[in-house]
Structure formats: C-alpha cells, structure tokens
Image (cartoon, rainbow, N blue to C red):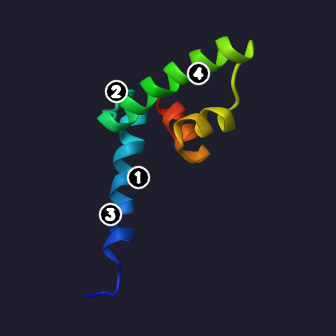
Amino acid sequence: NQGTKFSSYACFWILGEMKKIVREDKPMKVSRDITSLNLKIDKISLLLTQKLGRTPTITEISNMLGLEEWMIIEALMVK
C-alpha cells in the first residue's frame, strides 16, 4: 500500500485512454443516457424556438427539463 487513492490512479488511466482515442481520431462511445438527454434537449429546443421566436438559452432548456445547467452543457459538448 503506497497511500494512493484508487480514484487518482484510475483518473490517470482514463485520461490517458481518452487522449489516445483523440490522438488516433477514433470514435468515442456515448452512453445511452447522454444520447437520450440530447434527444430531449433537441425536442425542447425546437419547442422553445417556436414558442419564443428565438434560440433558447441553456437556462431556459434546463428549466424546462428540470435539470442543472451543467448537465445540459456537458450533453451538448458530446454531440
């Protein structure tokens, strides 16, 4: 036992694998939860665009879905 937490050890390997995927330009797998959330965001965004006559803000989308803004931002970044 060297006193290193598993999470810090795992983070090192996960980050390394992600960099490798980006460097090799391989597609990343996206969880079904994120895919499902992106579909909901698209649906709500279209509804709000029609209702407001403009592109909705992240805050407006998050309020409609009842989610935190950071969750919406992260889901959109994966798109």
For the N terminus, the image quarter is bottom left
Give the farthest residue toward the front.
Answer: 51
Q: Nearer the viewer, residue 40 or 2?
A: 40
Which of discs 2 and 4 lies nearer the camera? The answer is 4
Mark 4 lies on residue: 45
Q: Nearer the viewer, residue 27 or 30?
A: 30
Q: Earlier in the sequence, mark 4 or mark 1?
A: 1
Query: What number is the disc on residue 15?
Result: 1
Which of discs 3 and 4 lies nearer the camera? The answer is 4
Residue 36 appearing in the image: yes
Residue 24 appearing in the image: no
Q: How many marks?
A: 4
Amino acid carrying mark 1 in the image: Leu
* Residue depicted at 34% across the width and 37% down the height: 33
Q: CA distance from mark 3 to mark 2?
A: 21 Å
Secondary structure of the residue carrying tag 2 is loop
* Residue depicted at 68% across the width and 15% down the height: 51
Q: Earlier in the sequence, mark 3 or mark 4?
A: 3
Q: Earlier in the sequence, mark 2 or mark 1?
A: 1
Mark 2 lies on residue: 27
Q: Earlier in the sequence, mark 3 or mark 1?
A: 3
Q: Position of residue 36 (x, y in %)?
A: 37, 30
Q: Earlier in the sequence, mark 3 or mark 2?
A: 3
